[in-house]
Image (cartoon, helix red, strand yellow):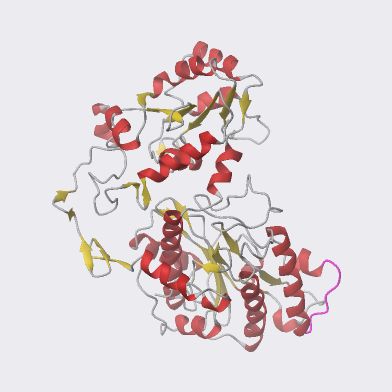
Amino acid sequence: MRYVNNLYGLAPFMQLRWALRRPATTFRAGRRVFGSQAIATETSGIHDLKPTLYGQPVFRSHPYLVKPHELTPGIPVEEYERRRKELMDSLPSNSIAVSVAAPIKYMSGNIFYKFRQASDFWYLTGFEEPDAAVILEKTSTSRGYRMTLFCNGKDSAKEKWEGARTSFDDALSIFKADDAMSIHSFPSQLKSITSLYSNIYIDLPNTPSKRSPRTVKSLLRYLSPSVKPRSERESVEDSLSSSTRRPLAPLVAKLRSIKSEHEQEVMHAAADISGSALAKTMGFTQPCISESAIAAHFEYLCSLSGSQRLAYVPVVASGPNALIIHYTSNNQVVKEGEMILMDAGCEYNGYASDITRTYPVSGRFTPAQRDLYTAVLNAQKSLIGLCTESASLSLNELHHRSCELLRSELNQLDFRLHTGDLERVLYPHFLSHPIGIDLHESTNFDRGEQLKAGMVITVEPGLYVPATPQFPRCYHNMGIRIEDEVLVDQEHSVVLSFSAPKEIEDVERACVGQLDPQPV
């Protein structure tokens, strides 16, 4: 499989580095195959445990998913330790950091959604159960901090219904906490600890309504029903409602913006899964099929390849629907002669992927479709080549370049652009966003900051031509976007989503089933 894009100045040694770092992976008949070595349900004499004794996959229970040195698939124990140390080293003396797990979310009544952990909490701990929290106290030890992990612990009655929970002893040994305590004791412990420190770094959870302010009370309700007594809640509110409280998220975001080599490998695997699924979905598409069937086919292929979930609701926009940037209804029928704009990506081992491809339903672009597609593709390839630290560009500057490039391409297609036509009508969205554990890691990201090696961003120019007289008629109702995930390096850019075809010849071959993507 081709891992990197050498068209954009990528040095040959980078190709070798990626090829050696991650062997091709396939899934066959319930077992995962790495190259020629099969790892079934037995690894080095260790059998998987059924039912598991732990609240998440660990090496002892899932040796075919988690390696001996890893805490979560692909991420070593030592990396979580490094993340916490870097965070605590960045804090002033007499500081603590507090992070809480995500709550279980419900679709209707007591029907819950599949649980997904809070991103910052998972980044710092690797712990994947709800009703949990962590307190990190800055110390003068060589480790630099003391870690207390709060969780539910074992409960045989509830585990009978809900599955295994991690014990307090395992919280110490597996997650390397200094102390493990019941989540029920979190409020009292938080109150007693905060009185000892001058700087408390903590994030208050989002409230259901934007009009409702984030408060300390919302933090404790976030852990409900584990945290119940009102008097205890009120006393904790008093201890945190002071000038000592600081936001934690911006500090964690700074760490998360630079991906380690292990993170890069997991993100590359996620992009491989999504790219291969997109290529195969092109061949699955045919006239008279529903957009929802195309979305379902993509999700099925991702799940078959090990993805835990989709990273977002996919866009499968046929024909004029592609002019709706976030079209997710996916409830109409595909017609002969149309193009499909498909924006889709899976989440794999905690990391999101985000790819967009536009392809012809009939298997071949019409001349007009080909011309407009080429305009977007030329601009995108030029922009990817600028995604290096040495280029000293920010996302804002890259977006400005994208407007210049698209304007030049459209002028060659006899578009007579007036002020505002491009930015307000034909290309109304921003070029890029950082991606990682979250699909959009933009909340605490400065678009004016220069790109640095280790960042992963999307590059997604697009053109959306409404059926209005000021634009050439042959392009009316066409929407085209091409999006890749790009790893920023010092002198080169690495396209992580290279397995998704985007050259016209490759797209047309994939549409008729003649381009066989490597299995992931």
Residue 93: image x %, image y %?
57, 26
Q: Is residue 413 placed above or below 449 in the rendered structure?
A: below
Query: In this picture, which residue range is highlighted in magenta?
Result: 414-420
- Horizontal side of residue 73 vs 210, given as left or right: left
Single out the residue that lies furthest toward the bottom. Answer: 367
Q: Residue at image x 27%, y 28%?
A: 169
Q: Looking at the image, can residue 230 be seen?
A: yes
Residue 196 belongs to the span the image colors magenta: no
Q: Is residue 259 placed above or below 175 in the rendered structure?
A: below
Question: 149 or 216, which is in the foreground?
Answer: 149
Corner quadrant of residue 2: bottom left
Which quadrant of the rendered structure holds the C terminus?
A: bottom left
Please name the predominant secondary structure of the magenta segment in the image.
loop
Question: 258 or 35, which is in the foreground?
Answer: 258
Residue 258: image x %, image y %?
54, 52
Q: Residue at image x 68%, y 49%?
A: 446
Q: Is residue 509 placed above or below 262 in the rendered structure?
A: below
Q: Looking at the image, can residue 112 be seen?
A: no
Corner quadrant of residue 38: bottom left
Single out the residue that lies furthest toward the top. Answer: 231
- Horizontal side of residue 300 vs 368, given as left or right: left
Question: 281 or 384, which is in the foreground?
Answer: 384
